[in-house]
Amino acid sequence: MARPPYRDLSYAFGPGPVSPAIKILMIVNVGAFLLSLAVPDVIMALGFQPEAIVQRLAIWRFATYMFLHGDLMHLLFNMLALWMFGTELERTWRTRFFIKYYFVTGIGAAVITFLWSLSGLPYADSIYYSVVIGASGAIYGVLLAYGLTFPHRPIYLYFIFPIQAKYFVMIVGAIAFLSSIGSSGGGIAHTAHLGGLVVGYVYLMGLRRRPLDELRYRWLRWKLNRARGKFGIYSGGRDDDSWKSDWKKHIH
C-alpha cells in the first residue's frame, strides 16, 4: 500500500481549540496574576490561609486562592494542564457540570488542607500559618477525572514516555501523598494536590453510585409491592379477544 504524500499528513498537539469554560478560567487566572503583580497585597488578602479563616472568618479564601499564582511558570504549567486535560472533559460533560466539578475540587482541596492544618499531622503548624495559592488542587481533580473518563488514553510522561492515563493518575497521586508526609517543605503545596485528588474521586464515585436514587428506588418498589397485595394488581392481559366485543358495545 502506497504511503500518502507528505503534504496530506497533518499533526496536532493537544485536545484542539480552547472550550468555553477553559477560556473563561484562563482569562480570570491571567487577570488575577497581572493584578497580583501590580498589587502584591492581593495575595495576602485572597490567598488561602487557615489562620486567617479561623481568626477573621475569611471564608472567601476557600475559593479565591485558586486564581492566584506565585510566578509565571506556575501559571503557565497550570493553564497548560487545564487546557490539555480539561478541554476534552468539558466537551464530554458539558460546560455546566465541568465548572461545578472544577469548583468542587478546588474548594474541596482547600477544605482538606484546612482540616490537615488543624489535625496535628506532619506540617500542620506550617500549613496553618502559610498562604497557599494556585489552581493546582482543581487541576489535580481534573487530572483524576480525565484518568477515570479516558483510562486508556496515552499520556506522554515528560513528553517522551507513553503511559495510560489511569496509571499516570496513580503515579501523580502517589507522589502527592508521599510529598505531603515527606521530609521536605513542599508538603504544604502537595497537601492541596492530594486534596484535589481525594475530593474529585469521592465526588465522581458518589455520582456514579447515587445512594439517594437507590433508596428512592427501593422505597417505590416497596410501595408498589404493597399496592399489589392490597388491591390485587396482576401483570399481564386477557388471553381471549372478548375485549374487542366489549369495546364495540361502547361505540355508537
Image (spheres, rainbow, N blue to C red):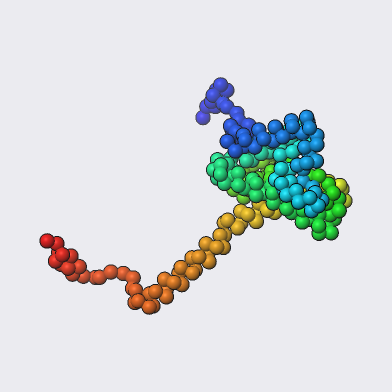
In the rendering, at what x and y percent does residue 215 appear? 53, 66
Rendered residue at 80%/34% (across/down):
40
In the rendering, at what x and y percent does residue 39 appear? 78, 32
Whether residue 150 is visible to the viewer of this picture, yes or no, is: no
Rendered residue at 70%/32% (across/down):
31
Whether residue 204 is visible to the viewer of this picture, yes or no, is: yes
Along the horizontal axis of the image, is 110 left or right of 11? right
Count of labels in the image = 0
Along the horizontal axis of the image, is 251 left or right of 90? left
Residue sticking out furthest to the top: 7
Along the horizontal axis of the image, is 87 left or right of 218? right
- Is 247 or 240 nearer to us in this picture? 247
Q: Is residue 68 above or below residue 97?
A: above
In the rendering, at what x and y percent does residue 33 appear? 74, 33
- Is 123 or 50 nearer to us in this picture? 50
Rendered residue at 33%/73% (across/down):
234
Residue sticking out furthest to the left: 252
- Is 81 or 224 nearer to us in this picture? 224
Quadrant that contains the C terminus: bottom left
- Is 149 or 224 nearer to us in this picture? 224
Q: Is residue 244 above or below residue 203?
A: below
In the rendering, at what x and y percent does residue 105 appear? 67, 49
Q: Is residue 156 above or below residue 123?
A: above
Residue 69, quarter of picture: top right
